[in-house]
């Protein structure tokens, strides 16, 4: 993802999160699972988390999976198709 525009893959991941299809691990480096399958774009997934577009929906023990949710920024990016 560039500073100005999210990639099509970024937007697809954000749409999947919005649809409730994504779980996230609460590791130091988060992993995303879409429909129960590990997301192959670990760098992109980590970037979306570090950029503040998505987060775990609840606190959890490190290493466990919880549903992911969009942050307010992530929802805005998804709806506008542009990064802040």
Image (cartoon, grey):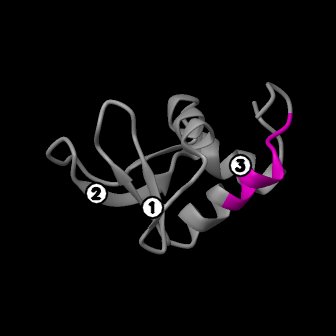
Q: Residue furthest left?
A: 61
Q: Is residue 42 above or below residue 36?
A: above
Is residue 54 part of the magenta span, yes or no?
no
Residue 5 rendering spot, x and y as whole percentages? 85, 37
Residue at position x 83%, y 41% in the image: 82
Residue hosting label 2: 65
Seen from the viewer's position, the closer of residues 4 and 84 is 4
Residue hosting label 3: 10
* CA separation in Å, label 2 and label 3: 20 Å
Left or right, 83 with respect to 31, comes to right
Residue 33, numbered label? 1
Magenta residues, start to end: 5-12
Seen from the viewer's position, the closer of residues 54 and 30 is 30
Left or right, 48 with respect to 62, comes to right
Residue 68 rendering spot, x and y as whole percentages? 42, 56
**Label 2 element class:** strand
Q: Earlier in the sequence, mark 3 or mark 1?
A: 3
Within-10-Å neighbours for mark 3: few <14, some 14–19, many 20+: many
Q: Magenta stretch mostly in which secondary structure?
A: helix
Is residue 7 part of the magenta span, yes or no?
yes
Q: Are marks 1 and 2 in contact (CB under 8 Å)?
A: yes
Residue at position x 21%, y 53% in the image: 64
* CA separation in Å, label 1 and label 2: 9 Å
Q: Is residue 25 above or below residue 2?
A: below
Residue 53 rendering spot, x and y as whole percentages? 58, 41
**Label 1 element class:** strand
Left or right, 64 with respect to 8, comes to left
Q: Residue furthest front?
A: 40
């Amino acid at each position: 993802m560039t500073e100005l525009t999210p990639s099509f893959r970024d937007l697809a991941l954000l749409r999947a999160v919005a649809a409730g299809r994504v779980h996230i691990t609460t590791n130091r480096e988060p992993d995303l699972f879409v429909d129960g399958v590990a997301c192959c774009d670990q760098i992109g997934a980590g970037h979306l988390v570090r950029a503040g577009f998505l987060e775990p929906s609840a606190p959890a023990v490190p290493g466990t999976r919880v549903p992911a949710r969009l942050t307010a920024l992530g929802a805005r990016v998804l709806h506008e198709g542009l990064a802040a």
